[in-house]
Amino acid sequence: MSDIAFKTLGGEGPDLVMIHGFGSDRLSWAGTSPALMEVARVHALDLPGHGESLGSESGDGSPLALAELVADVLDANGIGQAHLLGHSLGGGIAMVLALAQPERVLSLSLIAPTGLGRGIDRDFLADLAELATREEAEALLQRLVTKPLLINRFTIARVLEQLERPGAREALRKIAEGVVAQEEQLGEWASQIAATGIPRLVIFGGADQINPPDAMSLVGFAGRTLVIPEAGHLPHVEAARQVNAELTDFIRSVGA
C-alpha cells in the first residue's frame, strides 16, 4: 500500500508504529513521538482518508479492513515485528491486527481505544465529516478535551482545511459507518486478546465524552491500565508528560 503515507520519525531500538484516531493524522503524535524515540525506532502513518493518505482505498472502512491495510504497510516497509501504539480508532485497529497476527506485535499501547469503552459517540462520528464553519468545528472539537484552550484557531483551521480536500468527507463517512457496524464485534475481539499473551497497556481519560472507559471491559482485557481523571478523549495531549512517562516505562519493561 505505497499510497499510505508512512514516515520514520527517528529513534533507535525496536520498531514502534503509531496509529492515529478518526479525523486526525500522524501529526497528532507530535507531543508523543520525541519521548518514544528514547526507547524505540518510531514510525507514524496516515490512515486512508486522513492526512496525506486521502487517495488511499479503505475497503469497507471497518477496523478489520483498516488493520489489513496497516499490515500491508508494515510489510511494504520491512517491519516484521513492532510495538503498536493506537489512539481511539487507531487503538481498535491495533487490537484487530494483534489478534490476527499476534506473532508480529511486541506490545499494545492503547489510548482511549475503540472496543474497550462504553461506546463511541456516534453523533461525533457523523458530525465531524459535515463540519462547515469555525463555530461548528470549535463546538464539536471541544468535546474531545477538558481544557478548552487546547482547541485553538490553528487546530480548527487545520480540521476544516483537511475536510475541504477532495474525497476527505466521503472517506470519513465511510470509515464512520465501518466503525459503527463493527464496534460490538470489536469489543468481543478485544476480550480475546488476553489469551495471546501480548503485553498490553491501556490509557483512558476519566472525563472522556467520546468513548468513556468501561471498567468491566478493562478488567477483561487484563492489561496494565491508567485512567487519568481530569483528561478527556486526548490524554496524550491533555496530560502529555504523564502519558509519555507511562508509555516509555511500559515499552522499556517489554523490551524487544
Image: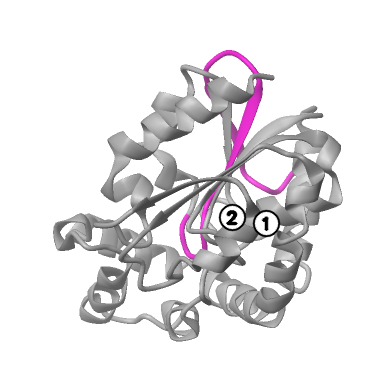
Q: Which residue, given by chain and number where applicable, does mark 1 sit on?
A: 93
Q: Quadrant of the C terminus?
A: top right
Report if residue 72 is visible in the image: no
Residue in view at x 56 percent, y 67 percent: 216
Instruction: Please indicate whether residue 178 sits to the left or right of residue 153 in the image.
Output: right
Q: Is residue 230 magenta?
A: no
Q: In the depicted view, which residue is nearer to us: 43 or 38?
A: 38
Quadrant of the rendered image containing residue 151: bottom left
The x, y position of residue 170, in whole percent, is 59, 78
Residue at point 44%, 31% (across, down) = 33
Residue 217 position in % (x across, y down) = 59, 65
Give the residue type at disc 1.
Ile
Disc 2 residue crowd, few under 14, some 14–19, many 20+, Cα 10 Å: many
Residue 191: image quadrant is bottom right
Q: Is residue 11 magenta?
A: yes
Q: Label 1: how many residues lie within 10 Å, few (<14), some (14-19) or many (20+)?
A: many
Q: Is residue 27 visible?
A: yes
- Which segment did they paint magenta? 1-24
Instruction: Decide which of 207, 237 is in the foreground and name it.
Output: 207
| Residue beneath the point at 75% across and 52% down | 193
Front-lying residue, 73 or 85 = 85
Q: Which residue is mark 2?
A: 90
